[in-house]
Amino acid sequence: MDYCKKFLITPGTKVKLDRIDPEDTAEFKNKKAALKRLGQNKKQLAELQYSLYAENKQSLLIVLQALDAGGKDGTINHVLAPMNPQGCRVQSFKVPNNVELAHDFLWRVHRVTPKNGEVVIFNRSHYEDVLVTRVHNVVSAKTCRQRFELINSFEELLASNNTRIVKLFLHISKDEQLKRFIKRLNKKEKHWKISEGDYKERQLWDRYVEAFEDAMSNCSKPHAPWYVIPANNKWFRNLAVSQILVETLQKMDMKLPEPTVNIEDIRKLAQEEFDKAGTP
């Protein structure tokens, strides 16, 4: 199954999240089979990232967005951990500081986009400036529409510089969010993740859903597509994300660079040194 096609928000279509089942597990009926495929995908991701890093001509930007408890951290830990940190980094976006607020809203984002050969994962992103700001009436609907246009132009600029962009919305239900909040309360090691704001923001669920729908409807483009990942089942979320990334990297068709030295000459010198040392 082509996951890039199955979970794609087709450019120009109106997103309605209530028509997308967060419990969907595609062709997988059980966790065991999915975990087997996930293991295979992780191996492929490590190999493909190696090729991307070695080629050093393209880059990959992965944008992760979700409602609270949607699973951004878990996705990073379970899907992207096999990548070599020498060519991969995670960039989180918190509330803008005074320096960032003194610039346009894309300034802090552009400076941390991936360079050639690199994979960068945005844990939250520039979309916060058309999500949180909209829900809390910091910016107007008119400003949001203008920002959609600026975001599209910004992502088009990145794509023209050989950055492949994959934007993933981890789709959970309101009931699933509550279950995860309760689990956090019951696990001491998860208490650090809990904030009073989580439960206040939950009261704004419908407004956040509307904001996400609007952002994806306006900003899913051929050069920077949005994918909605059913994420109630964490095992399927991880599988779907890994599959989309494998398919994306394969389409990038990376080529290992040609050697800069004569391999046969180097092999001969190495063999001569090996023989001289008398190593068995």
Image: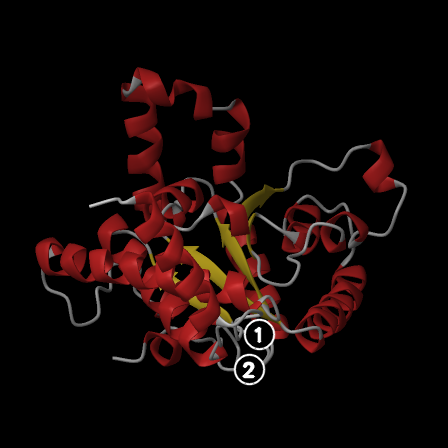
| Relative image position of residue 65 (x, y in whole percent) | 51, 53
Seen at 33% across and 74% down, the residue is 3
* Among the two numbered marks 2 and 1 on one chain, the one whose residue lies closer to the N terminus: 2
Residue 173 visible within the image:
no
Mark count: 2
Q: Secondary structure at mark 1?
A: loop
Q: How is the image coloured?
A: secondary structure
Q: For the residue marked with disc 2, what is the amino acid?
A: Pro
Residue 58 visible within the image:
yes
| Relative image position of residue 169 (x, y in whole percent) | 46, 59
Residue extending furthest top? Answer: 188
Seen at 70% across and 47% down, the residue is 133
| Relative image position of residue 196 (x, y in whole percent) | 52, 23
Seen at 64% across and 46% down, the residue is 132
Name the residue carrying label 1.
Answer: 220
Q: Nearer the viewer, residue 140 or 157?
A: 157
Q: Which mark is residue 11?
A: 2
Tell me whether circle 2 and circle 1 mark residues in contact (CB < 8 Å).
yes
Instruction: Identify the image quadrant of residue 73.
Output: top left
Within 10 Å of disc 2 (Cα), the crowding (few <14, some 14-19, many 20+) is some
Left or right: 151 in relation to 263: right
Q: Nearer the viewer, residue 209 or 33?
A: 33
Seen at 34% across and 78% down, the residue is 6
Q: Secondary structure at mark 2?
A: loop
Above or below 214: residue 193 = above
